[in-house]
Structure formats: C-alpha cells, structure tokens
Image: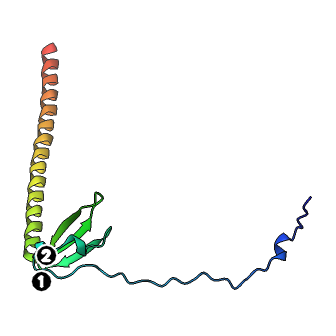
Amino acid sequence: MNYYPNNFYQNYPYNNNYQQPIQQNQIGILQGKVVDSIDMVKANEVPFGSFGIFPKGDLSEIYVKAWSNNGTTQINTYKAIPKEEIQENIQDKNDVLLEKITTLNEKLDILLNSGNKQETTTIKEKEVSKVNAY
C-alpha cells in the first residue's frame, strides 16, 4: 500500500521565477514583383498555399494571384477608381433613392386621401339610408 502525505507537492522543487518565453513578431514578406501585364504573372512565383501580389508598373492595377482549393491558381485584379467617378456614382444613387422616396410619398398621399373619401362616402350613405327609413 502506497502512502501519499498531504504535502505531496512540497517534496518537489517549485520554481517561482518561471516566465513564459517572449515571442518575437516576425515580419511577413510579401511574395511578388512589379509586372507590365497580367501575362507576366507566373504560377511558380506564388508560394504554394499562399498568394502573391503583382502591381502593374504604372500602378494602375494590382494583380493578386492565389492558390485555390483544387490546386489551380486564380487572379484577382484590383483597379483604382477615380474620385470623380465615385462622386458621380454616389450622386446617381442619391437621385434614384430620391425618386423612389418621392414616388412612395405620392402613393401614400393618394392612398390616404382615398381612404378619407371612402369614409366620407360611407358616412353620407348611412345618413341617406336613415333619412329614407323615416
């Protein structure tokens, strides 16, 4: 029969100075290079299971080539949008939204006004039927 004293853990040395190791941040390196066209982006320049970034020489486009789950690569193209085009797009969307709100407002006015007319005609018909009943 084994005997375990109440102070079982006192028999073992305990280091109060234990500290967790400090992990240093590793700086990631982007894979890729500057290219002249999308045709210059080769699959062997992309690390397997990762992606590569290939900016066009004039910085008008950026190609990101990545490995997909089926073992092939795919390219996503990112283009800068001029500020004027963004403003025009926002203005167009605002105009469409304002037009829809105006249309809904007109439909609500028609609906509310027709509801009042129906109530008025119903009340007048009831009054006429009461007068005719006497």
State the residue at coordinates (7%, 75%). Answer: 84
Q: What residue type is labelled 1?
A: Gly
Numbered badge on residue 40: 2
Q: Which amino acid does label 2 sit on?
A: Met
Q: What element carries label 1?
A: loop
Judging depth in this view, the residue of 26 and 103 nearest the camera is 26
State the residue at coordinates (11%, 37%). Answer: 114
The percent position of residue 48, horizontal first and vertical second, equals 31, 69
| Label 1–label 2 contact, CB within 8 A | no
State the residue at coordinates (9%, 50%). Answer: 103
State the residue at coordinates (81%, 72%). Answer: 9
Give the left or right position of residue 11, taking residue 64 as reference: right
Numbered badge on residue 2: none
Task: State whether residue 3 appears in this view.
Answer: yes
Q: Few, some or many C-alpha atoms within 10 Å of disc 1 (few <14, some 14-19, many ≥20)?
A: few
The percent position of residue 67, horizontal first and vertical second, equals 27, 65
First of labels 1, 2 by sequence position: 2
Label 1, on which residue? 57
Judging depth in this view, the residue of 65 and 25 nearest the camera is 65
* Cα–Cα span, label 1 and label 2: 11 Å
Residue 51, located in which quarter of the rendered image?
Answer: bottom left
Residue 44, located in which quarter of the rendered image?
Answer: bottom left
As drawn, 134 above or below 127: above
As drawn, 83 above or below 72: below
